[in-house]
């Protein structure tokens, strides 16, 4: 009887993995894929020690071969530059776990299959909306992030990062465009990476 239960659980696990792969493939097919994606973001960071969330707004630029520019405009202007191996802020350069660098590229570039290396993924897909839940496989990343939830339609429209310590960051993306080229200012930012 125990062997049958173990086999049934194993079969259910395999069936769930196949179902999740199908959902991921369906969602990836919906997403607009271009070398450049840019837009605005509205972010709320819910810290366990504060009653009200910290709110920031800004813009982002994703370039397939260069990385991501994340510019916070309010309340305090700042810039974050990230590619698959580096993260550059006003405080300097930091190495990043490979899975973290891939999240931005996969999310903003529409290549969600890249996330399977660094995350266990489950999801749902309806006609006009989808949602994915990502759980890090990397031990270093697990110490920081417990879960990432992505949702959208033909674009990623929201991102929720649930930190291991209980803090939650919610980001909504708006005014998303796919220009054919980046500006000279964006080019200069990417050269810093």
Image (spheres, rainbow, N blue to C red):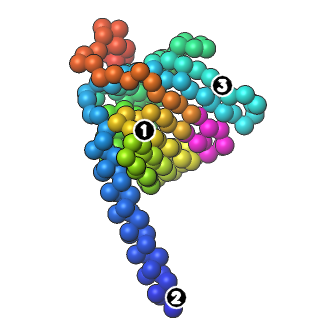
Which residue sits furthest top?
184
The boundaries of the magenta stretch are 161-169
Q: Which residue is mark 3?
A: 54
Residue picked out by circle 1? 152
Q: Upstream in the sequence, badge 3 or badge 1?
A: 3
Q: Residue furthest left?
A: 180
Left or right of 96: which side holds 74?
Answer: right
User: Which structural element holds mark 1?
Assistant: strand
Q: Is 146 drawn above or below residue 40 in the view shown?
A: below
Task: Kindly identify the residue that appears in the image at 42 percent across and 43 percent down.
Answer: 129
| Earlier sequence position, callout 2 versus callout 1 | 2
> Residue 143: x percent and y percent?
57, 46
Specify few, some or many for label 1: CA neighbours under 10 Å numbering under 14, 14-19, or 20 or more: many
Q: Residue at x 41, y 27 (%)?
A: 82
Which is nearer the eye, 43 or 165? 43
State how far apart marks 3 and 2 are (Cα): 51 Å
Q: Position of residue 181 (x, y in %)?
A: 25, 16
Q: Secondary structure at mark 3?
A: strand
Disc 2: which residue: 2
The span from disc 2 to disc 1 (Cα, nearest Å) is 42 Å
In terms of depth relative to the viewer, which is nearer, 41 or 98?
41
Q: What residue lies at 58% left-to-right and 20% top-to-bottom?
A: 56
x then y, percent, for residue 55? 62, 23
Q: Tell me the mark number nearer the camera, choosing from 3 and 1.
A: 1
Residue 167 among those drawn in magenta: yes
């Amino acid at each position: 009887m125990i062997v049958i239960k173990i086999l049934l659980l194993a079969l259910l696990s395999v069936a769930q993995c196949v179902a999740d792969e199908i959902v991921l493939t369906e969602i990836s097919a919906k997403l607009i894929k271009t070398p450049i994606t840019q837009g605005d973001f509205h972010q709320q960071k819910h810290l366990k020690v504060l009653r009200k969330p910290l709110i920031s707004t800004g813009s982002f630029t994703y370039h397939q071969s260069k990385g991501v520019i994340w510019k916070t405009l309010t309340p305090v202007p700042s810039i974050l530059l990230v590619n698959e191996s580096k993260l550059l802020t006003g405080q300097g350069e930091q190495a990043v776990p490979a899975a973290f660098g891939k999240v931005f590229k996969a999310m903003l570039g529409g290549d969600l299959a890249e996330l399977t290396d660094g995350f266990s993924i489950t999801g749902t897909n309806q006609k006009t909306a989808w949602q994915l839940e990502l759980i890090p496989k990397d031990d270093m990343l697990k110490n920081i992030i417990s879960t990432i939830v992505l949702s959208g339609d033909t674009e990623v429209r929201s991102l929720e990062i649930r930190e291991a310590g209980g803090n939650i960051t919610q980001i909504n993306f708006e005014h998303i465009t796919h220009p054919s080229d980046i500006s000279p200012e964006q080019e200069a930012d990417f050269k810093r990476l």
